[in-house]
């Protein structure tokens, strides 16, 4: 597995508009992208800090994964995402090492990324996301 960087840190929020304002005021950085991913039942907003991004996640459905997360745990850090090379091979590698997968196959995520999640039961209680830019030709 080749990890190039922490791609982003995902933070679950109840109100995206209010959270964007708070992060813009706090860091003095503009939100550069807002995107809805309907199959994941979320709206996202991104801030770039160096090579890493902060991804704010607002649920568009209380029964979606972010809605359930906020109901159970409240707002806060949801996941850490790592940029990897060759996501399909990386997925097979982590599964062979015994890590529990949430996604058996890469799927489209925000900002042109293919993504998979590893279950926190096998990663010390932290939801981990592995990402690969789907526009990069292998």
Image (cartoon, rainbow, N blue to C red):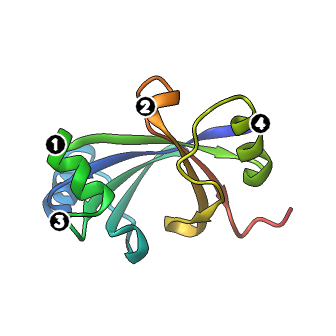
Q: Is residue 106 above or below residue 100?
A: below
* Whole-number angstrom distance, CA of label 3 to CA of label 1: 17 Å
Frontmost residue, 113 versus 4 = 113
- Label 4–label 1 contact, CB within 8 A: no
SS assignment at label 1: loop
User: Percent from the top left, x then y, of residue 112?
Assistant: 59, 69
* Drawn side of residue 135 relative to residue 123, left or right: right
* Drawn side of residue 81 relative to residue 132, left or right: left
Point 49% across, 66% down: residue: 110
How dense is the environment of label 3, judged by Cα within 10 Å: few (below 14), some, or many (20 and up)?
few
- Label 4–label 2 contact, CB within 8 A: no
Point 72% across, 29% down: residue: 97
* Whole-number angstrom distance, CA of label 4 to CA of label 2: 19 Å
Q: Quadrant of the N terminus?
A: top right
Q: Which mark is residue 74?
A: 1
Q: Residue furthest right?
A: 138
| Quarter assignment of residue 15 | bottom left
Of mark 1 and mark 2, the one earlier in the sequence is: 1
* Whole-number angstrom distance, CA of label 2 to CA of label 3: 26 Å
* Whole-number angstrom distance, CA of label 3 to CA of label 4: 37 Å
* Whole-number angstrom distance, CA of label 1 to CA of label 2: 15 Å
* Drawn side of residue 24 relative to residue 55, left or right: left
Nearer the observer: mark 3 or 1; the answer is 1
* Drawn side of residue 3 relative to residue 42, left or right: right
Residue denoted by label 4: 1
- Label 3–label 1 contact, CB within 8 A: no
How dense is the environment of label 1, judged by Cα within 10 Å: few (below 14), some, or many (20 and up)?
some
Residue denoted by label 2: 126
Residue denoted by label 3: 17
């Amino acid at each position: 597995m080749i990890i190039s960087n922490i791609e982003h840190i995902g933070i679950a929020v109840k109100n995206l508009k209010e959270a964007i304002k708070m992060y813009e005021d706090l860091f003095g950085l503009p939100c550069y992208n807002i995107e809805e991913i309907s199959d994941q039942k979320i709206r996202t907003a991104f801030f770039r800090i160096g090579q890493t991004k902060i991804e704010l996640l607002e649920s568009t459905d209380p029964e979606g994964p972010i809605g359930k997360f906020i109901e159970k745990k409240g707002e806060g850090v949801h996941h850490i995402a790592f940029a990897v090379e060759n996501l399909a091979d990386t997925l097979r590698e982590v599964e062979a090492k015994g890590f529990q997968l949430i996604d058996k196959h890469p799927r489209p995520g925000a900002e042109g990324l293919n993504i998979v999640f590893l279950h926190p039961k096998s990663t010390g209680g932290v939801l981990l996301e592995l990402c690969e830019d789907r526009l990069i030709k292998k």
